[in-house]
Image (tube, rainbow, N blue to C red):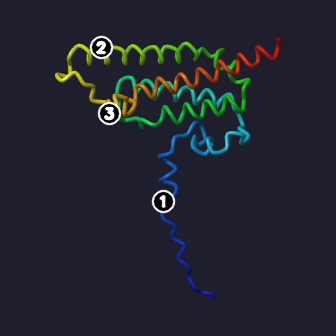
C-alpha cells in the first residue's frame, strides 16, 4: 500500500458532540450523567455544589419571570442533582447554609406560593365566566402542575433534603 493516500477527513462537528453541547452541565460535569451515578467521585464536590446552586437559582428566576429561553425541566433536573449530591455528601449541607443559599430558596418558595395564591384568587373572582377552572379535569382534580408549582415543589424538595441531613447530624450527636 505504499504510495496510497487514505482520506481521513473527519467531520468538524460529530453528531454526538452536538447532542452533548445541549446537555446541562455544571463545570465539567454533565448533570444527567451525574444523576445516573451520584456516587461517582467528584474532584471538587463543594465547587460542584456551588455551581448547581447558582444555576438552580438562575433557572428559578427565569421561571419566575416566564422567560422561555430556559428549558422548563431545568430547575427540576438541577434540584434532583442537588438532592442526590446532598445524599451522597451530607456534610455539604452545612456549606449551603454557610454560603447563604437557604434564605434564597425559602424566598423562592414563598414567592411562588404568593403568586399561586394570587392566581387562584383571580380565578375565584370571576375571570372564568362559567366558574370552572380550566386546569381541572372532570373529577375536579388538577390535571397538571404549572411550571411555577413545579419550581416551588423542587425548592421544597431541596430544602427538605437540607433539613433532613442537618437534623440527622443533630440527633446523632445527642
Asked if residue 58 lies left or right of residue 166, the reply is left
Seen at 71% across and 42% down, the residue is 40
Q: Is residue 8 above or below residue 171?
A: below
Q: Secondary structure at mark 3?
A: loop
Tell me the distance, in whole angstroms, between the alpha carbons under discs 2 and 1: 49 Å
- Residue at the far bottom: name it: 1
Asked if residue 59 lies left or right of residue 81, the reply is left
Tell me the distance, in whole angstroms, between the alpha carbons under discs 1 and 3: 42 Å
Q: Are marks 2 and 1 in contact (CB under 8 Å)?
A: no
Q: Residues within 10 Å of mark 3 (few under 14, many from 20)?
A: few
Q: Secondary structure at mark 1?
A: helix
Frontmost residue, 60 versus 26:
60
Spot occupied by residue 1 in the image (x, y as percentages of width and height): 63, 88
| Disc marking residue 121 | 2
Q: Which circle, 3 or 2, is nearer the viewer?
A: 3
Spot occupied by residue 3 in the image (x, y as percentages of width and height): 59, 86
- Residue at the far front: name it: 139
Frontmost residue, 130 versus 59:
130
Q: Residues within 10 Å of mark 1 (few under 14, many from 20)?
A: few
Mark 2 or mark 1, which has the lower sequence index? Answer: 1
Seen at 58% across and 15% down, the residue is 102
Tell me the distance, in whole angstroms, between the alpha carbons under discs 3 and 2: 19 Å
Image quadrant where one finds the C terminus: top right
User: Residue 38 appears in which quarter of the rendering?
Assistant: top right
Residue carrying label 1: 15
Q: Are marks 1 and 3 in contact (CB under 8 Å)?
A: no
Spot occupied by residue 111 in the image (x, y as percentages of width and height): 42, 15
Mark 3 or mark 2, which has the lower sequence index? Answer: 2
User: Residue 158 appears in which quarter of the rendering?
Assistant: top right
Residue carrying label 3: 137
Seen at 41% across and 35% down, the residue is 72
Amino acid at each position: 500500500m505504499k504510495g496510497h493516500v487514505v482520506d481521513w477527513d473527519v467531520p468538524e462537528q460529530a453528531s454526538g458532540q452536538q447532542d452533548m453541547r445541549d446537555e446541562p452541565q455544571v463545570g465539567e460535569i454533565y448533570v444527567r450523567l451525574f444523576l445516573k451515578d451520584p456516587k461517582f467521585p467528584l474532584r471538587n464536590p463543594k465547587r460542584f455544589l456551588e455551581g448547581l446552586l447558582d444555576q438552580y437559582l438562575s433557572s428559578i428566576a427565569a421561571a419566575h419571570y416566564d422567560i422561555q429561553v430556559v428549558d422548563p425541566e431545568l430547575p427540576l433536573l438541577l434540584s434532583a442533582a442537588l438532592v442526590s449530591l446532598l445524599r451522597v455528601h451530607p456534610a455539604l449541607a452545612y456549606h449551603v447554609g454557610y454560603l447563604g443559599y437557604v434564605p434564597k430558596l425559602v424566598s423562592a418558595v414563598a414567592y411562588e406560593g404568593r403568586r399561586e395564591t394570587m392566581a387562584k384568587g383571580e380565578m375565584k373572582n370571576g375571570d372564568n365566566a362559567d366558574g370552572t377552572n380550566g386546569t381541572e379535569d372532570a373529577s375536579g382534580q388538577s390535571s397538571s402542575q404549572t411550571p411555577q408549582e413545579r419550581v416551588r415543589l423542587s425548592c421544597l424538595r431541596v430544602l427538605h433534603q437540607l433539613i433532613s441531613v442537618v437534623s440527622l447530624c443533630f440527633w446523632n450527636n445527642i
